[in-house]
Amino acid sequence: MKIIMDADCLIKLTKAGLKEAVCEAFSVTLPFQVKHEVVDAGSTHPDARIVARNIENRRLIVAGIASSIQRKGEHAAEELFATSEFDIICSDDKKFLRTLRSRGIPHATPGVLTLLMVSQGVWAVPDAERALEKLEGLVSADELVVVRLKLRTLATEPQP
């Protein structure tokens, strides 16, 4: 699955220690503006150094136009989605998620990524539950409740 990630989602997954697993499971692309927001403008933060290393190692791909860094990463993510072959945009910004929903653009949040990893056989349900514990305090409590309920459903479904 090819995903575009905004800064909000990237930072939260990095803080939770889940970014590496997500990068292994999916092809993750950052719009150039997101790279600028997280790595260049945030260079004093430890998370910025981790993301910079992932870019250097090609675990994260950077795409887009460098000349428009004054635009927000969310706008660049939407523009990149419209011009390329991506499956979803990942964000945890409520306003941006509403915009994506209203435009019919497939999207996911950090918690939903854990569900996708289970549905694709990357993680078992207990792995996803542990990942959600790491996201506590970083994402909304409502998101965690809904994802945990869905994980319980998955755990009780017969496996093929």
Image: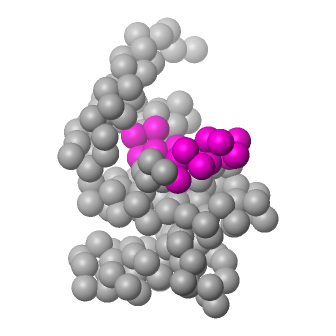
Q: Is residue 29 above or below residue 155?
A: below
Quarter in which the C terminus is drawn: top right
Magenta stretch in the rendered image: 96-112
Choose top left, top right, bottom left or bottom right for residue 4.
Answer: bottom right
Q: Quick check: 87 left or right of 122?
A: right
From this view, report whether residue 139 is shown above or below residue 56: above
At horizontal 66% and vertical 77% (from top left) the residue drawn is 64
Q: Position of residue 150 (x, y in %)?
A: 42, 21
Residue 33, magenta (yes or no): no
Q: Is residue 102 magenta?
A: yes
Q: Position of residue 72 (x, y in %)?
A: 53, 72
Direction from residue 57 to residue 32 in the image, left or right: right
Of residues 156 and 132, the one drawn nearer to the viewer in this rendering = 132
**Residue 62 left/right relative to 59:** right
- What x and y, as percent, mark residue 119? 53, 31
**Residue 6 in sight from this viewpoint:** yes
Q: Position of residue 19 (x, y in %)?
A: 38, 58
Q: Is residue 17 visible?
A: no
